[in-house]
Image: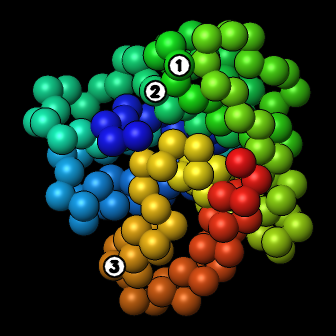
Amino acid sequence: MENCEVILAGFGGQGILFTGKLLAYAAMLKGKQLSWLPSYGPEMRGGTANCHVIVADEPIGSPIVTKPNILVAMNKPSLDKFEDSVAENGYIFVDSSLIDRRVERTDVNAVYIDSTRIANEIGNKSLANMVMLGAVLKATEVFSLNEIEETMKKSLPAKRLSLVETNMKAVKEGYGLV
């Protein structure tokens, strides 16, 4: 998938904004046009958070995504809020660890990933976003695993570079599930 409009949504603290930043930074490294628009409640941790990311070949007119072709729903309120907005034949990625319902639409590609459970098994529940990112990469081919790993190495501060290996382990775990 070359051009994409993405909404990542969940609770604050689930790495929604970080995942969006990774996608935006990967787009920049690839020479694409990009937009990254974060939104979060005043609570930040535990409140709602979503992030709009656009990756395109042409200039972007507005950073607001109204008809995403990729939705990542990390909690039920996010799925409830954004499911109807997804473009026909788009993708809805659902964290089935935290969401107890199926996607109601039949004109989209629903992908269920038990990302929170898998992250717990890896040893860190905060890696659920990286597990989900791996699934998104495999299903949509928006970026390769190598591009995301390079993005992490170039975008993370020096004191966080030690996290690349752990994050990539989670990304590869999610990648293998699709």
Q: Is mark 3 on a helix, strand or loop?
A: helix
Task: Say few, some or many: other residues with alpha carbon within 10 Å of mark 2 (under 14 / 14 to 19 / 20 or more).
Answer: many
Q: Name the residue at 31% across, 37% down.
A: 3
- Side (left or right) of 157 relative to 123: left
Q: What residue type is labelled 2?
A: Asn
| Viewer-closest of 142 and 61 | 142
**What's the amino acid at mark 3?**
Lys
Distance in Å between CA atoms under marks 3 and 2: 27 Å
The quadrant of the rendering that contains the N terminus is: top left
Verify CB contact (< 8 Å) between mark 3 and mark 2: no
| Left or right relative to 153: residue 29 | left
List the residue tagged with mark 2. Answer: 69
**Mark whose residue sits in front, 1 or 3:** 1
- Counting from the top left corner in percent of width and height, residue 140 is at 51, 42
* Mark 1 and mark 3: Cα distance apart in space: 33 Å
Please tell me whether mark 1 sits on a helix, a strand or a loop.
loop
Residue 14 seen from this side:
no
Residue identified by numbered label 3: 154
What is the distance, in whole Å, between disc 1 and disc 2 at their CAs? 8 Å
Q: Identify the mark at residue 176; answer none if there is no mark.
A: none
Q: Where is residue 164 in the image (x, y as percent from the top left)?
A: 54, 80
The residue carrying pointer 1 sits among few (fewer than 14), some (14 to 19) or many (20 or more) residues within 10 Å by Cα, namely few
Asked whether the beta carbons under mark 1 and mark 2 sit within 8 Å of each other, the answer is yes
Q: Does residue 159 sit above or below 48 in this rendering?
A: below
Q: Which colour scheme is used?
A: rainbow
Horizontally, residue 157 falls left or right of residue 176, namely left
Please state if 91 lies on the left or on the right of 1 as rendered. right
* Rendered residue at 65%/79% (across/down): 166
Residue 165 in the image: state x and y as whole percent. 60, 83
Q: Mark 1 points at which residue?
A: 89
| Residue drawn at (49%, 54%) of the image | 19
Residue drawn at 61 percent across, 73 percent down: 167
